Image (cartoon, rainbow, N blue to C red):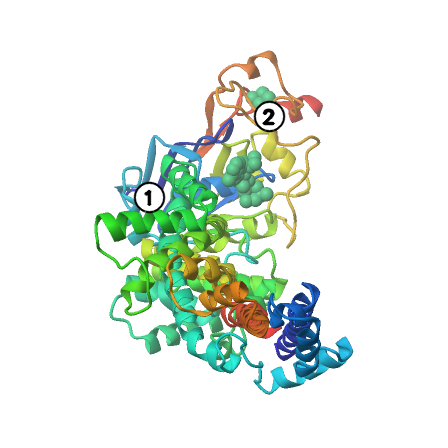
Amino acid sequence: MARFLLRRLLVALLVAATVMTVSFLLTRLSGDLAISIAGPNATQQDVELVRRAYGLDRPLWLQYLDWVARALQGDLGESYFFKDRVANLIAERLPITMSLGLVGLCIALAVALPLGILAAVRENTWVDRAVMLVALIGQAMPSFWLGLILMIVLGLRLGWLPISGTGSWQHYVMPGIVLAFSAIPSLMRLTRAGMIDALASDYIRTARAKGLSRLSILVKHALRNAAIPVVSIAAVQLGFMLGGSIVIETVFALHGVGFLAWESISKNDFPVVQAVVLVLALIYVGLTLLADLLNAALDPRLRAA
Amino acid sequence: MSALLEVAGLHVRFGEVAAVRGASLTVARGETHCLVGESGCGKSVTALAVMGLLARGARREAERLAFAGEDLRGLSDRAMSRLRGDRMAMIFQEPMTSLNPSYTVGSQMTEVLRRHRPGTTRARALDRAVELLGRVGITAPAMRLGQYPHQLSGGLRQRVMIAMALMCEPELLIADEPTTALDVTVQAQILRLLAGLQRDLGLAILLITHDLGIVARVAHRVSVMYAGEVVESAPTAALFAAPRHPYTRGLLACVPVPGKVRRDQPLGSIPGVVPRIPPGFAGCAFRDRCAHARPECAAAVPRRAAGPEHEFRCTLAPDWATRAEAALA
Ligand SMILES: Nc1ncnc2c1ncn2[C@@H]1O[C@H](COP(=O)(O)OP(=O)(O)OP(=O)(O)O)[C@@H](O)[C@H]1O
Ligand code: SF4
Ligand SMILES: [Mg+2]
């Protein structure tokens, strides 16, 4: 168990290091930063000044090490546009994005688990096919389009929910639904496949031979085993959702990290873009590690290994 | 009094495979009925059909299927689940995979007792589990309660399954090759345990086995299955002394003197394999392997009586073997 965790931790650290490097390089490779910071009306002299002021004239590896050293101390630099520390900007917006991700995940699980179980119990009947069709449609639907439809129906026509902004919990419902939609198909398929496997297994036959109730057979014995992969994929899906929040937060003007990224990209505010990419990627790496931990906690065979 | 378990004309189909074709057998209280036959002849399917545990897609039909006089055919799943685990229990042929990998031995053993005896405290249920684990020959039973199936060997898992089946003191125990993964001493201990329960509580046992030594020692009655049919059924002594069906004689061919069966004596082997029988098949299914096959074996095969409670299905006359031996002499 300890060895397993250590290995996973090492892999996570390795991925994190790669992510840092890539997010650093991304901004450096997209053109001369000094020119973009100095602005369209700057002279050659201004550009040179900016280059020196921001240390962009130093060798790339030195800039990289400098950036890494600062990032490790939580110093992600200054935003050019917001005139604030990037770390502050992110700290302010991250809770909003996390809440959105969690709302999305809860909605996704609340839909995917029961439907997946239902499809498995009614395998190869019209119920199963109907559920799988819904999953297919969900997968094919672009999220910004679904977002607009929801806005029109729930927001404008019915007036049940606010269509944009960050003020209250109601603001999280529609974007949460849209985010959930992207995760539902895979979670549902996984639940269904796991339940079909479990229900055909010898230990479920044993549970039936013991005369256990239907609920106990389905939930305690079958779902408990089918859920092991679902739980770890759910953690990974949460990571995807946080990444997807860049689109969703923009559509719904929800002022989270995703919205911040969108603003900064349009303003060429590269320290912020870099930091958002880094933070989201690190959260993703953290969630993958969490998935492994959950897996180990749920599966006694892994726990002992 | 009628038998505890009565099965007559049982049919089970998996799509285009007729796995059981009109099998009949009865098990009385306090009796051990052994079911023998080659691999694939439908023993497990028969047992699962009785318990109502057939896989999805199986179709079961029967002329009679009764437990303690109660017709099982029309019973709802809920009513059936009240019987299962409580009054009728089953030990499966697959000890490695029959326990849930996510729960401890203790949790899996106690839940069956607490399901059928509501109000049983966890502590009492655990005591009962420890007692039974001890009785099936598991050392340090209390320690086993906290272990997961993957921490146990095949033999231990099989014994856990046996102990679990006995938690509620069932009236009928269906045991599908329960001692295959066990060494001879443990096997003997479990057979003694079952014999003891039979004596004290009148336990009825339907025992599926390939081991003629076990049959000779514990069975009151033996049924021989072939291709989904019971082709011969008789009290144990009568069957060993005078087997009538050519298939039974083939299985017993390795027993030199009636009644002298070695421990661990496997069933004899007959050239050829059990055929897959499609629905609507007529005649004797054994005819392509039978040395005595005749044209009339392709028509309906009669059920013949060869003595008190001794029946077989064959076109040959009951005394064909003795006459053949006399002719040879
Ligand atoms: N779930 C199933 N689906 C389709 N066919 C099945 C299924 N279970 C059993 N069968 C078929 O039914 C027939 C009888 O199988 P069964 O398991 O009863 O044999 P058995 O007598 O118990 O053999 P063994 O001694 O090897 O345990 C076999 O031909 C098998 O292929
Ligand atoms: S019915 Fe015919 S083929 Fe079948 S066992 Fe008897 S003699 Fe052999
Ligand atoms: Mg079998």
The image's mark for residue B286 is 2
Q: Position of residue A276 (x, y in %)?
A: 54, 71
The chain carrying label 2 is: B
Q: Is residue A82 left or right of residue B258?
A: left
Nearest the eye: A212 or B173 = A212
Placement of A24 over or under B230, stated as above or below: below
The residue sitting at the top extreme is B295
| The residue carrying mark 1 has its beta carbon less than 8 Å from ligand 1 | no
The chain carrying label 1 is: B
SS for dot 1: loop
- Tag count: 2
The image's mark for residue B3 is 1
Placement of B67 over or under A285, stated as above or below: above
Q: Classify 10 Å Cα crowding around label 2: few (below 14), some (14-19), many (20 and above).
A: many
User: Which quarter is ligand 1 in?
Assistant: top right
Nearest the eye: A125 or A90 = A90
| The residue carrying mark 2 has its beta carbon less than 8 Å from ligand 2 | yes
